[in-house]
Amino acid sequence: MSNAQNLEDDIHDTLKSYYELALYDFIDFVTQQVVESYLNDPKGPVSFFNPTYVASLTSKAIEALGAENLDIVRDRAEKQATLARLKRAEEIALKYS
């Protein structure tokens, strides 16, 4: 390997290390300065979600907030039905083996 190639590799390694550190610092900065300050703001989106607000919700509203997506519910039901059929098939196969 030539000296030029070694120098190129050293520069590449240095830049890669700098990039990784800079990326970590950037993510940390954005998390602390932007996201946390937005969420902790007195007029932010989380401020209304307190025990008083939750206690004032109706059962139907709480169910709507905590409900799963209908596609997921449907998917789970299909998979449970398939699993039940496969377990029954396994029982039959074991019975005759």
Image (cartoon, rainbow, N blue to C red):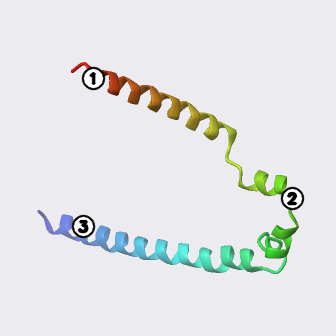
- The Cα–Cα distance between marks 1 and 2, rounded to whole angstroms, is 51 Å
Which numbered dot is residue 29? none
Name the residue tied to disc 1: 95
Q: In the visual, does 96 lie left or right of 40?
A: left
Q: In the visual, does 71 lie left or right of 81?
A: right
Query: What residue sits 40% from the left and 26% below the top?
Result: 88
Instruction: Tell me the amino acid under the disc marked 2.
Output: Thr
User: What is the quadrant of the C terminus in the image?
Assistant: top left
Where on the picture, by quarter, is residue 34? bottom right
Name the residue tied to disc 3: 9
Which sits earlier in the primary sequence, circle 2 or circle 3? 3
Q: Nearer the viewer, mark 2 or mark 3?
A: 2
Query: What residue sits 35% from the left and 74% below the top?
Result: 17
Image spot of residue 70 (x, y percent): 69, 39
Instruction: Tell me the amino acid under the disc marked 1.
Output: Lys
Image spot of residue 12 (x, y percent): 31, 67
Which numbered dot is residue 58? 2
User: What is the quadrant of the N terminus in the image?
Assistant: bottom left
